[in-house]
Image (cartoon, rainbow, N blue to C red):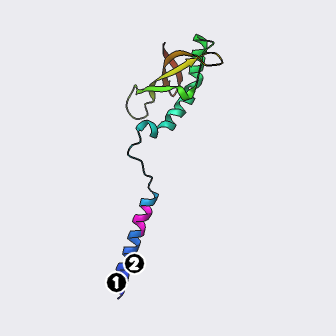
């Protein structure tokens, strides 16, 4: 009788553990794209690059503006590989507009050089 109780108790603990782990593990839908999963990271990157983009776009086109929700990260490239190497280029397309009714003026693509020393704009494409 004791042996059956021990086996029953072990099965109960095993089942409880499996159910708990299954319930606590976050489930990712199969149809979710990598962009959707990383959208928070992209948004943070756009916010951090915003002061540099705004400065360059306002210098080139003082009457133009853009919205971050409409900006698109086209490419992120690590320039140097290896451990603790933080040297990147980030290419972002900004759809610009002017005026109170926001007539579109066309995209401006900026290429940023991002390091631990700071951020600079390497290239402006109209």
Q: Residue furthest bottom?
A: 1
- Work out whether mark 2 precedes mark 1 in sequence or the reverse, and give the earlier one: 1
Res 74 quadrant in image: top left
- Dominant secondary-structure state across the stretch colored magenta: helix
SS under mark 2: helix
Mark 2 lies on residue = 9
Q: Whole-percent x and y of residue 19?
A: 42, 64
> Image height check: is 56 above or below 86?
above
Q: Residue furthest right?
A: 100
User: Which residues lie in the magenta part?
Assistant: 16-21
Q: Residue at x 63, y 19 (%)?
A: 101
> Image height check: is 27 above or below 16?
above
Q: CA distance from mark 2 to mark 1?
A: 8 Å
Residue 53: give its label.
none
Horizontal relation, residue 5 to residue 40: left or right: left
Q: Nearer the viewer, residue 105 or 88?
A: 105
Residue 4: give its label.
1
């Amino acid at each position: 009788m004791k042996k059956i109780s021990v086996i029953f108790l072990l099965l109960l603990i095993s089942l409880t553990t499996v159910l708990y782990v299954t319930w606590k593990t976050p489930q990712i839908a199969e149809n979710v794209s990598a962009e959707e999963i990383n959208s928070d990271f992209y948004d943070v990157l756009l916010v951090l690059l915003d002061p540099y983009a705004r400065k360059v776009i306002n210098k080139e086109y003082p009457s133009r503006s853009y919205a971050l929700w409409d900006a698109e990260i086209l490419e992120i490239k690590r320039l140097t590989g290896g451990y603790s190497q933080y040297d990147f280029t980030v290419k972002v397309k900004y759809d610009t507009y002017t005026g109170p009714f926001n007539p579109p003026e066309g995209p401006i693509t900026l290429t940023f050089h991002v390091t631990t020393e700071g951020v600079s704009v390497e290239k402006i494409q109209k």
